[in-house]
Structures are given as structure tokens and as C-alpha cells.
């Protein structure tokens, strides 16, 4: 692959930043990753990947996919291979370890590879060796980017908290839900200084009034509560105003427990700067008091100290554009979502596949904004649909949207998941490339290019709740 005549800055080295770096490296794009932390790192929790995400990894880079497969765990039982979740009544007092006594309310299938999950830190460890040596700088907390509004070929300047600066032909903001590049983008789109709080507040994530307890439970303890079948395979436990997910990670040695709570109370930190607060296992047991012995028994096996994680998202503040000039946002920075579809990271990887494929075709740095416009047109509709649909899904699981109409809940959840799982990403990329070619041929300035979102399927879009 011939090296491209431009150098890009990737801000943030989470799943999005690293997947993007690996994918650009494969396509001859040189880059530097600027990460605020002292080293790459992920939280000690599991992450699930749907088939669309796994297919996207293959487009990104075969090594990325191979690394994921080395650490991925799927449902252990052959009979559950194509199952995402068995959906159970979490309030039932019937024992889960006698499956015939606690039958699923419904089963979510249709996923060719079943549910693939991994420990986040293990996945990151697989990605890091795929990066070229010296391509990352640590302790670089981005504060601002200058030059975004200027047309022409001057490099953009990144300014870091430690007083240093760096230059690049484009900046790819992969800095997650608390993104600084989002503030820079929104300021540039509104032609205001990036310290204008009234405008920047409009780009901030808001609290979904849901928080979550997360725990990793040794499989032997999980089996003691749930039995073999319900521990070795993915389960979703529904209940009023709460739900919990359980699925195996670490090649079946550990059960990942994610327990969601809806609350009218505000989160103490309204600007999403503090997403976790200390909590205890007893807090979790109190919050799930209406649930049966299966979920309560599992919570009882969690560590005594359990953090409480707030679920913020961009549902109330969707970005009007993911890019401006040569600044482009990717992953959670652009579309942070609540996790109820289990697809946020998957959408980040889809983003990466599309953007890398577009950037891999470029011949000059002047084409970068046009590629970002094509990326925005290809991705924004689907990404923002996920954010809105994820909120709706939690309300379905927690009997808030359709009460206990389990047949209706099953139908709606299946339709929403099908939209996520069944994307033909190759076709979507081919369309984005045609769009890029058309824009380049017109030599249309990026700012003037029409940005049409991908239309939603008619059976889906009536559920959208934009504000
Ligand atoms: C409870 C929960 C469960 C989830 N479960 C799933 C799941 O099962 N499946 C799924 O697909 N998705 C899931 N998600 C969503 C998924 O975690 C995210 O979509 C994904 O991790 C986003 O990755 P990212 O790299 O875009 O952002 P992040 O992981 O937030 O990474 C951002 C990086 O940027 C760095 N950074 C931030 N600011 C700066 C700055 N100013 N300068 C320099 N560096 C900076 C950070 O240190 C970090 O390394 C879940 C989310 C939550 C909250």
C-alpha cells in the first residue's frame, strides 16, 4: 500500500481509536494517537459484540478480527449458538437451575454467531501489538484544536493540557463520551469560541435516569446459583424498572453481570464528568428487592464494593454533523449511547470500517473534508438511530413501554435488533465510496455538500423520539 500524503491525529486510544489506527495503518495512512492516560487501558468489565460488529472487524483488519476471536467467548451450548439472549422473568421465584421450572418468556435468536463477548482489557491487549511502534503519545489531554474553521492546506494544531502542541492534516476525535473534540466541533459549527458554555452545553451528554451495577463473578459461584445452562449462556432478566444481563466471558471462567436500575433521582454530576460513584453490594441488593432469588443470589456473589455507573448519552443532543473541515468525530465521541442494544462499541467499529475504507481511497489532504462529509452521510442516521432506540429498548425490558405484553415486547425487540444485525456493511461502504467519488468529481466544498442521513426502514423510524 502506497503511503498517503497526509498525517492524521487520533485523539483517544479506546476501542474506537485503536481500531481506527490499526485500520488506517493497513491502508497506508500515517497517524499519531494522543491519549490522555499514561497507558492504554480499559475497565475491568465485559463487552458483547454482535455479528455486524464482527463482520465490521473483518473489513477493518484481519488481525483485529483474529485478536478478537482469540479472546471472545460465545454461548457454550451448541443448542444456543444462534441465541443472543434467553429472556427470563427476573421477579420469578422459580429456580433457574431447574430450566423446566423457569421457562424463558421468549428467546432472541437470528444472530448467526450467537453472542460474542470478551473482557475489554483482553481485547485491548490484542489490539496494541497491531500498532506500529512509536505511534502513540501518552499523558496528552487535548484541550483545543485550532485551524478547524480555516479552509486551505494549513495543518491543524492540537493543544494539550501540558502546554505542548502538535500538528496534523486532520484530527479524528475518538475521545469517547466526555469528548473534548465534540466541544471543539460544536463551537466550530456554531462559529463561536470553544469556551462559549451556552453552546458547548448543547453538545453534552445527558443522564438517561438509568444507572448500572457491574460485576464479574467466578463461574463456579454463578453455577451454584443459576445452574449450568443459565450460567454458560447469555440471559436477560426482565422486571419492573430494572433488568439484568448475564453472560460468560474469559472463555467461560467468569460470568459478566450487568444490573440496570431506572430512577427519577438526578445524577450528582450533571455534566457526565463523573460517571461512577462508589456503591456496595448491599445497595444493589436493596435496589433489586422486588426480584427473585436468581438475580438476588447472583448479586450476593458479587464483590462487596461495587461501583454505580451512570448511563449518559447524546439522545437529547444529537450532533447536526459529525465533522467540520478536517475535524471528524468517530465512535462514542460522535454518538455516545446507553448500552441497551449491546451495540455501542459495534457501531464504533462499523464507523471505523467505513471511515478507513473511505480514507484509504484518498490521494491528497485536500480530499479529507470531502471524505468526512461522505462518512457523515453514511453513518450519522444509523448511529443516532441506535442512541434513540437503545433508550426505548430499556423501557421495553423494564415493562415501562408495553407493560407485560411479552409477545409485543418480543416482536419490537426483534425488529430493532434485526436492523442492527442485518446491515450489509459491504454494500453500505460501496455506496459511501460512490458518494465520495461524486462529491470529489463535483469538487464540492465540504461545507456545501448535502448531508442526507441513511433513511430508516419504515417499520423502525416511528419509534424515534427526537427532541
Ligand atoms: C455499562 C455499559 C455497557 C456497555 N456494553 C456494551 C456492549 O456489551 N457492547 C457494545 O458494543 N458496547 C457496549 N457499550 C458501549 C461501549 O462501551 C462504547 O461504545 C465504547 O467503549 C466506546 O469506545 P470509544 O473508544 O469510542 O470511547 P472510550 O472507550 O470512552 O475511549 C475514549 C478514549 O479517549 C481518551 N480521551 C478522552 N478524552 C481525551 C482527551 N481530551 N485527550 C486525549 N484523550 C482523551 C480516554 O482516556 C479513552 O482512552 C457499553 C457501555 C456502557 C456504559
Image (cartoon, helix red, strand yellow):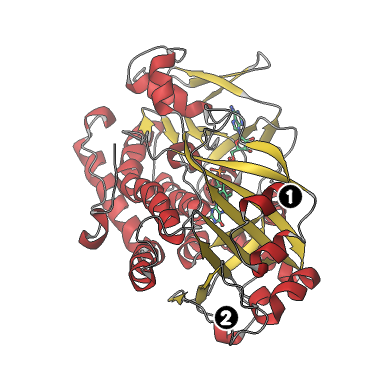
Q: Where 453 falls versus 316 (above or below)?
A: below
> Which residue carries the number 2 mark?
102
Q: Residues within 10 Å of mark 2 (few under 14, many from 20)?
A: some
Question: Number of callouts in the render?
Answer: 2
Q: Position of residue 150 (x, y in %)?
A: 36, 17
Q: Position of residue 161 (x, y in %)?
A: 64, 17
Viewer-nearest residue: 213 or 325? 213
Q: Where 48 falls versus 351 (above or below)?
A: below
**Residue 130 seen in the current view:** no
**Residue 290 seen in the current view:** yes
Q: Where is residue 206 in the image (x, y as percent from the top left)?
A: 46, 33
* Ligand 1 position by quadrant: top right
> Which residue carries the number 1 mark?
282
Q: Is mark 2 on a helix, strand or loop?
A: loop
Q: Position of residue 48 (x, y in %)?
A: 57, 61
Locate residue 362: give its quadrant.
Answer: top left
Amino acid at each position: 500500500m502506497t503511503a498517503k500524503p497526509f498525517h492524521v491525529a487520533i485523539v483517544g486510544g479506546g476501542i474506537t481509536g485503536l481500531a481506527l489506527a490499526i485500520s488506517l495503518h493497513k491502508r497506508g495512512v500515517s497517524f499519531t494517537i494522543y491519549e490522555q492516560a499514561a497507558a492504554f487501558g480499559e475497565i475491568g468489565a465485559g463487552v458483547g459484540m454482535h455479528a455486524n460488529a464482527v463482520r465490521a472487524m473483518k473489513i477493518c483488519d484481519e488481525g483485529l478480527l483474529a485478536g478478537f476471536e482469540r479472546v471472545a467467548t460465545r454461548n457454550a451450548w451448541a443448542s444456543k449458538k444462534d441465541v443472543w439472549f434467553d429472556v427470563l422473568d427476573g421477579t420469578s421465584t422459580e429456580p433457574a437451575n431447574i430450566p423446566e421450572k423457569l421457562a424463558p418468556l421468549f428467546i432472541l435468536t437470528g444472530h448467526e454467531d450467537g453472542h460474542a463477548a470478551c473482557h475489554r482489557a483482553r481485547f485491548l491487549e490484542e489490539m496494541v501489538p497491531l500498532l506500529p511502534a512509536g505511534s502513540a503519545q501518552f499523558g496528552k489531554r487535548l484541550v483545543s484544536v485550532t485551524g478547524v474553521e480555516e479552509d486551505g492546506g494549513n495543518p491543524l494544531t492540537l493543544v494539550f493540557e501540558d502546554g505542548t502542541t502538535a500538528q496534523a492534516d486532520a484530527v479524528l476525535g475518538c475521545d469517547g463520551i466526555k469528548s473534548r473534540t465534540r466541544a471543539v466541533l460544536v463551537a466550530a459549527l456554531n462559529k463561536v469560541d470553544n469556551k462559549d458554555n451556552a453552546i458547548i452545553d448543547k453538545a453534552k451528554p445527558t443522564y438517561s435516569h438509568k444507572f448500572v451495577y457491574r460485576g464479574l463473578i467466578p463461574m463456579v459461584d454463578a453455577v451454584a446459583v443459576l445452574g449450568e445452562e443459565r450460567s454458560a449462556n447469555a440471559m436477560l432478566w426482565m422486571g419492573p424498572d430494572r433488568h439484568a444481563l448475564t453472560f460468560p466471558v474469559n472463555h467461560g471462567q467468569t460470568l459478566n453481570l450487568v444490573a440496570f436500575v431506572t430512577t427519577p433521582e438526578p445524577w450528582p454530576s450533571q455534566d457526565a464528568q463523573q460517571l461512577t460513584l462508589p456503591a456496595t453490594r448491599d445497595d444493589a441488593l436493596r435496589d433489586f428487592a422486588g426480584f427473585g432469588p436468581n438475580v438476588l443470589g447472583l448479586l450476593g456473589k458479587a464483590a462487596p464494593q461495587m461501583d454505580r455507573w451512570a448511563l449518559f448519552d447524546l439522545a437529547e443532543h444529537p450532533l447536526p454533523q459529525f465533522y467540520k473541515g478536517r475535524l471528524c468525530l468517530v465512535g462514542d465521541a460522535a454518538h455516545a449511547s446507553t448500552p441497551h442494544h449491546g451495540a455501542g462499541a459495534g457501531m464504533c467499529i462499523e464507523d471505523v470500517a467505513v471511515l478507513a475504507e473511505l480514507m484509504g481511497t484518498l490521494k491528497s489532504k485536500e480530499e479529507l473534508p470531502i471524505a468526512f462529509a461522505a462518512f457523515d452521510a453514511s453513518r450519522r442516521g444509523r448511529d443516532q438511530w441506535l442512541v434513540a432506540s437503545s433508550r426505548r429498548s430499556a423501557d421495553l425490558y423494564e415493562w415501562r413501554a408495553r407493560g407485560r405484553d411479552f409477545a409485543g415486547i418480543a416482536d419490537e425487540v426483534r425488529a430493532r435488533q434485526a436492523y442492527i444485525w442485518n446491515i450489509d456493511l459491504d454494500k453500505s461502504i460501496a455506496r459511501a465510496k460512490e458518494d465520495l467519488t461524486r462529491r470529489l468529481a463535483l469538487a464540492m466544498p465540504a461545507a456545501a455538500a448535502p448531508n442526507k442521513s441513511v433513511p430508516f426502514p419504515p417499520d423502525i423510524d416511528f419509534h424515534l423520539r427526537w427532541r
